[in-house]
Image: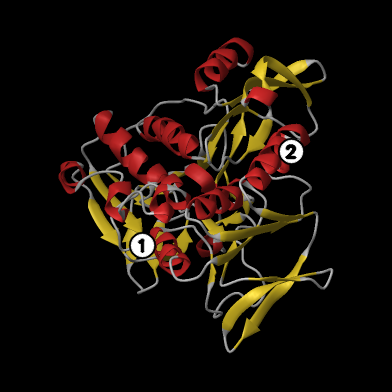
Amino acid sequence: MSPPGDILIVGASAAGLSTAEALRRLGYRGRLTMLDAEPRFPYDRPPLSKQVLAGVWEPVRARLRDVARLEALDAEMILGEPAAGFDAETRAVTTVSGRVLNAEAVVIATGLTPARLPGQDGTAGVYVVRGMDDAVALRAHLLRGPRLVVVGEGALGAEIAATARGMGLDVTLAGLGSTLLGAQVGAEVGELITRTHAGHGVRLRLGVQVAGLAVDAGRVTGVRLLTGEVLPADAVVVAVGCRPAIGWLEGSGLVLGDGVACDARCRAADGVYAVGDVASFWHEGLARRLRLENRTNATEQAQVVAANLLGADRPYVPIPYFWTDQYDVKIQAHGLPSPSAELSIAEGDPAEHRFTALYRENGRVTGVLGWNMPKQARLLRQRELA
């Protein structure tokens, strides 16, 4: 298979940019185009809920590459132009302005779209934190109003709550789960995270369903729970999950569902690949389909996609990984730490806020977690999950 003459990457965030850089490192010298809905140069998203929101970083510091390195990539960057449609057979992308971009190969890297609450759109004071503009606008609001309600008990909601408490705000967090991050790390570790937030003064309303928003004159004044209770707020952050950004691919001829369905090589169709949060790929080692929403996956998967575009035949078989920083807690999770797995402490002591843990299902280690022990967790991963 000869390398394609031209390649179009739709999405210029971490996954898309990493794919472009990997292509150039592997010797691809053909025409390379990157299309992205945002008008900004590529930036990193993990700092948005932490350093950027806290004001520790200026937004420009979150840029993935400086201008000189982007120019050296020798790629045409079409920014501020969302993709609106795609024909997989002809590999033609149509943008919202009606522009049609054709290429011999297309890489889909459009990431995620945040889920929203009914009545959220058009209500002042209600935010999601997915992009840089979201984080900047939320920070400006938090500097004016002391009461924040976060809806969502996952990693993003917990990180925003921790950042806001560090800024001195009055923070309430509401969610359906009985613990923070329970769906990701299980009840036992989730309970430790929950106690950490409570110890830092976050008011927790867990195990309750949000009925909607309390609004006065177009501005949010609180969050209504199904119990009838209203949580007063000057600002509300909705962090109830994200969905793959695949609306523009309807009718494209690709198989869609929980993302863009790909084979083990991250190929969705002839000459079409997907990478990053939007890609649902077949993991040969686990014999199951996965879609991974984390920064590490975006970079690692991009290397495989770039190689396969240039004629390799490499399956993508990662060990899943994610991390989260909250207050003085750094958590690293390797593998698949399912909530249904049996948890055992491998090293350290949860009471001392430093430990590693193993997750087992049917007698087999499926996940490794480190709590303020990143090096030890990495070594445990190498031994148990390699």
> Can residue 386 be seen from the camera position used here?
no
Q: Residue reaching furthest top? A: 383
Which of the labelled discs sits on residue 38, or is there none? 1
Quadrant location, the N terminus: top left
Q: Position of residue 28 (x, y in %)?
A: 25, 34
Above or below, 45 against 28 in this view is below
Q: Nearer the viewer, residue 92 or 199?
A: 199
- Residue 328 pos. (x, y %): 52, 36
Answer few, some or many: residues within 10 Å of disc 2's Cα (few below 14, many 20 plus, some between 14 and 19): some
Q: Is residue 253 left or right of residue 93?
A: right
Residue 173 position by quadrant = bottom right
Mark whose residue sits in front, 2 or 1: 2
- The residue lying at 58 percent from left, 61 percent from top is 170
Q: Residue at x 64, y 45 (%)?
A: 197
> Which residue is at 40% across, 26% downward?
312
- Drawn side of residue 62 relative to residue 207, left or right: left
